[in-house]
Amino acid sequence: MTNNEGNSKFIILYHRTPFEERIDKHGKRSWEDHKSPNGIIPTLRNLFESHKDGTWIAWRKVDTIDNEEDDKVLLNDPYPLKLRRIPLENNEITSFYHVTSKESFWPILHTFPTYFDVNNADWQIFEEVNKRFAIAACKEAAKNALVWVHDYNLWLAPSFIRAKRPDIKIGFFHHTPFPGNDVFAILPWRHQIVESLLDCDLVGFHIPRYTENFARAANCLVGAQRAPKKSVDKKFIAVGSALTEPTDTAWLNHKGRKIRLLSSPVGTSPELIQSLINKPMVKKYANQIVEGTKKGRKLILSASRVDYTKGNEELLLAFERLLERRTDLHGEVVLMLSCVSAATGMKIYEDTQRSIEEMAGRINGRFSLIDWVPIRISTRRIPYEEMIAWFSEADICWITPLRDGLNLVAKEYAAARKGRDGVLVLSEFTGASVLLDGAILTNPYSHRRMDEAIEEAISMEQQEQIIRMNSMTKAVESYTVKDWAFDQIKGITDE
């Protein structure tokens, strides 16, 4: 690294680019919105409206890194945004992202230690990629700039930045769960990871439980001193379920530095969702859903990715048990399972998808009638407008991951059902479970609790549905994705 200062006062480090690059057959480059939009990327992008001297740092794939340098692109629509992309060869991406991040970190973060695999991890490559991100940030950063680092695959970037540029304000947001210390400590690199996060000015998490888990790890593993606990913010449900936490730690002291900890869940964009419902394209999709799937039946929607953490197989087995118990529901209920395929080529995800598809096929084979197929399954990436239409028509949204950092689908469903009925069945092992008072919480590890929850959802009276949905919609509207971004950035800069 060098001491040279750039001119960007605001920098985001995120492995994804703000737009997707498209190269046509003539070699002309264009930039388009991501096919799988979420609240994060548009919101982070919009921050550059007020930080016109800012830079977004991501990666790009190259055939060979020889003579390759970071490329710089100025995106002007709808406002100037500098994009700096770090070249990574395919073997580096595979090692850094698919192996070390997904095979070693992911199962530990989600408390699946039996899936943990350290044998193929190349820690040196992970360090090198993180260092390249840090070098790029230091080169772009003006004096006293703010650098906001996102997610666990850039765990080490803060320490590399701090070593060279102590003037920089560094924030880090953890988009996944943070596990208990006994599970986190399985990682051989635990000390280096924690020390790097403690080089930040602020470390953010979705909910107080993850904040407390990190504070405990920092205290136990490297001796960071914890501030007295405080009551959690009123946006969180403080007692009663698996992830509730009545108090959390506001800051840590380590090596003469004060590190602020902030529990603030990523929000969604309720106004956008509610406006989309009335768009002609969404209404067209909704009509197709009614005519092609619902046909007067009760529609249950579940939406997730193909991943062993998402509980899709447990949900399908619960639906099968429902059809075994309730012959009166044959022909009267349809489950739409949107389960987006993983594009990584990783065997564990391929096996998981095969299991899901085989299970759905078996259940359909058992129960289908001439005019009714109980399960519709889609592994394609559903366009956002179409997903909003599914939200608008689904009588029940059934979201039961075994572990999930937050779960924006649950929040989006609540936003889409404003002023209407609808039931949300939600795993108590999602971060959203401590935010959405009104959901039917369930334990996806328990057959009995899963069975009770779906029965309660199917039989719930409309008036109770409206009352519960109103509570959840208010929660979603009171803390949006913009509120999250504001609180995190304010927390980084506050002394």
Image (tube, rainbow, N blue to C red):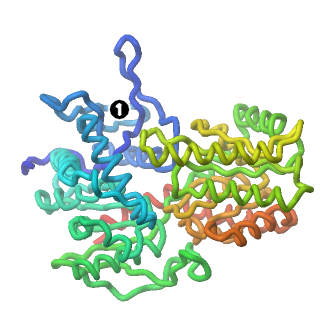
Report the residue at 41% width, 70% height from top.
179
Q: Residue 209 placed where, x, y %?
A: 46, 75
Give the quarter of the image for residue 284.
top right
Q: Amino acid at mark 1?
A: Leu
Q: Residue 367 placed where, x, y %?
A: 83, 47
Which residue in the structure is indicated by mark 1?
75
* 219 horizontally vs 473: left or right: left
Report the residue at 67% width, 44% height from top.
388
Q: Secondary structure at mark 1?
A: strand
Q: In front: 355, or 131? A: 355
Vertical placement of residue 59 versus 391, above or below: above
Q: Residue 212 placed where, x, y %?
A: 41, 78
* 260 horizontally vs 455: left or right: left
- Give the farthest residue toward the top: 26
Residue 487 visible, this orientation: no
* 278 horizontally vs 160: left or right: right
Report the residue at 56% width, 72% height from top.
235
* 361 horizontally vs 307: left or right: right
Q: In front: 239, or 468? A: 239
Q: Residue 86 placed where, x, y %?
A: 24, 38
